[in-house]
Image (cartoon, grey):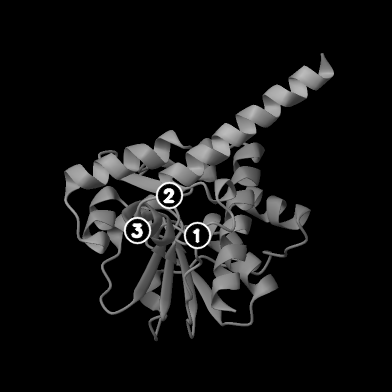
């Protein structure tokens, strides 16, 4: 019985791996995954990057989603907008990681009270590249639950203060938006941008939501710092 169960699991794993390889056996799909490696993008942004029509893009996106490679996130800002997120754990080692060489990094969320502050603290732990955080509509203070989740993971946010993005004297060479509202509100020209569609833990209010946001940011920051190393 145990041998039969193990055989079934192996068979399912083999089929899943074959589905992933099959989904990637197209230049456009591989290019989509490469584009999504560091940034969530809308379908129209992907179509623009790849130079293909919406119908062809939809065909390729359906194949990637069917293989479990991508998932669609509804924007928490403009609910009509969708972001495509790459499930990188499904294809680790199968696609190339783009290189980035920023002189400075700015993490931005709407209120600069949780996600962007956590992203900045994580970044400073793993990279020597200068970084700051800011908000499009900064709150009066960092959220207490963000302070607590940071402390649980050995990070100190006690001196952090939300600030408006307009207070920056020098624009960053890399702008990373960590919430949909900020991504859709900012209109900066001449700045390289990445977007991470991460839900607002403040809106949810539960400790688990802050932990989930921290885990998502930890994974993204690690990938970005490796690409910038």
Asked whether residue 144 appears in the rendered view, the answer is yes
Label 3, on which residue?
Answer: 183
Q: Is residue 89 above or below residue 14?
A: below
x then y, percent, for residue 187: 26, 67
Residue identifier under label 1 = 95
Look at the numbered discs 2 and 1 and tell me whether their residues touch, using CB distance below 8 Å: yes
Residue lying at 66% horizontally and 39% vertically, measured from the top left:
207
Q: Which numbered disc, 3 or 2, marks the residue closer to the eye?
A: 2
Q: Would residue 129 be found to the left or right of residue 109 on screen?
A: right
Q: Which residue is mark 2?
A: 24
**Number of residues whose C-alpha sits closer than 10 Å to that of mark 2, classed few (under 14), some (14–19) or many (20 or more):** many
On the question of residue 199 being in view, the answer is no
Q: Where, by quadrant of the figure, is residue 222 drawn?
A: bottom right
Quadrant where the C terminus sits is bottom right
* Residue located 35% across and 51% down the image: 26
Q: Residue furthest top?
A: 1
Question: Is residue 15 left or right of 40 when viewed as pictured?
Answer: right
* Residue 62 horizontal/vertical position (percent): 33, 37
Mark 3 Cα shell of 10 Å, populated few (<14), some (14-19), many (≥20): many
Mark sitting earlier along the chain (3/1):
1
Image side of residue 50 versus residue 120, left or right? left
Q: Nearer the viewer, residue 72 or 57?
A: 57
Q: Secondary structure at mark 3?
A: helix
- Where 173 falls versus 223 (above or below)? below
Of callouts 3 and 2, the N-terminal one: 2
Whole-number angstrom distance, CA of label 2 to CA of label 1 = 9 Å
Q: How far apart are labels 3 and 2 at the CA level? A: 29 Å
Mark nearest the camera among 3 and 1 is 1
The one nearer the camera, 105 or 139, is: 105
């Amino acid at each position: 019985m145990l041998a039969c169960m193990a055989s079934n699991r192996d068979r399912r794993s083999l089929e899943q791996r074959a589905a992933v390889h099959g989904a990637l056996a197209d230049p456009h799909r591989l290019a989509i995954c490469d584009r999504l490696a560091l940034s969530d993008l809308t379908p129209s942004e992907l179509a623009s990057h790849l130079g293909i029509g919406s119908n062809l893009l939809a065909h390729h996106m359906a194949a990637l989603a069917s293989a479990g490679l991508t998932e669609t996130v509804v924007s928490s800002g403009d609910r009509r907008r969708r972001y495509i997120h790459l499930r990188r754990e499904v294809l680790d080692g199968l696609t190339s990681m783009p290189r980035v060489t920023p002189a400075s990094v700015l993490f931005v969320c709407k209120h600069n009270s949780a996600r962007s502050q956590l992203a900045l603290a994580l970044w400073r732990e793993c990279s020597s590249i200068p970084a700051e955080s800011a908000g499009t509509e900064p709150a009066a203070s960092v959220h207490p639950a963000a302070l607590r989740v940071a402390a649980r993971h050995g990070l100190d946010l006690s001196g952090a203060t939300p600030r408006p993005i307009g207070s920056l004297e020098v624009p960053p060479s890399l702008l990373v938006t960590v919430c949909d509202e900020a991504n859709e509100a900012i209109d900066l020209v001449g700045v390289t941008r990445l977007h991470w569609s991460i839900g607002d833990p403040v809106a949810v209010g539960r400790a688990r939501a802050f932990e989930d946001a921290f885990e998502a940011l930890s994974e993204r920051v690690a990938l970005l710092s490796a690409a910038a190393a």
